Amino acid sequence: MPAAAVAAKAAAPAAATVNAVCKDGTPFSGDTLKGACRGHGGVDKKAGTAAAAAPAVGKPATKADSAPMAQAPGGGAGKVWANDSTKVYHCANDKFYGKTKHGEYMSEADAKAKGFHGSHGKACTQ
């Protein structure tokens, strides 16, 4: 293997480890929760979220270990978050308000005029 490839591989960041607890109490540690706790009743969401929120011992905290994405700046009274990729708009009290990757703030009327529809088919109540 060329020296440049060895150096690049050594410099590559390690994958974040996800820690969880299965419903039967069995601990789980892996790269993702996909398939986690198969045969153990699934992931215990109450215990799994606390374990997954803490960074693995001996590893520095990464962006993946932190809390959910912060709200994008720019929202305000009368504004909805319009997700460009799904054509769905989210009201200020929605958990996805300002948090999806592709979107922008606009009035609900502008969102409807551009062909967006309310999350779960519901309009925002002001």
Image (cartoon, helix red, strand yellow):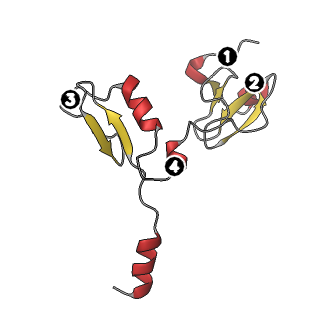
Residue ranking furthest to the right: 77
Q: Judge by depth and name the residue closer to the eye, 10 or 59.
A: 59
Binning the other alpha carbons within 10 Å of mark 2 as few (below 14), some (14 to 19) or many (20 upward) gives many
Point out the frontmost of discs 3 and 2: 3
Coordinates of residue 44 in the picture (x, y in percent): 33, 25
- The alpha-carbon separation of the residues under discs 1 and 4 comes to 39 Å
Are the residues at dot 1 and dot 4 in contact (C-beta closer than 8 Å)?
Answer: no
- The alpha-carbon separation of the residues under discs 3 and 2 comes to 45 Å
In the picture of the structure, the residue carrying the numbered disc 2 is 108
Mark seen at residue 1: none
In the picture of the structure, the residue carrying the numbered disc 4 is 61
> Which residue is found at the position 72% from the left and 33% from the top?
114
- Element under disc 4: loop
Are the residues at dot 1 and dot 2 in contact (C-beta closer than 8 Å)?
Answer: yes
Mark seen at residue 40: 3
Binning the other alpha carbons within 10 Å of mark 1 as few (below 14), some (14 to 19) or many (20 upward) gives some
Point out the frontmost of discs 3 and 1: 3
- The alpha-carbon separation of the residues under discs 3 and 1 comes to 40 Å
Q: Quick check: 18 above or below 77?
A: below
> Which residue is found at the position 52% from the left and 50% from the top?
62
- The alpha-carbon separation of the residues under discs 3 and 4 comes to 28 Å
Residue type of the residue flagged with mark 3: His
Residue type of the residue flagged with mark 2: Glu
- Element under disc 2: helix
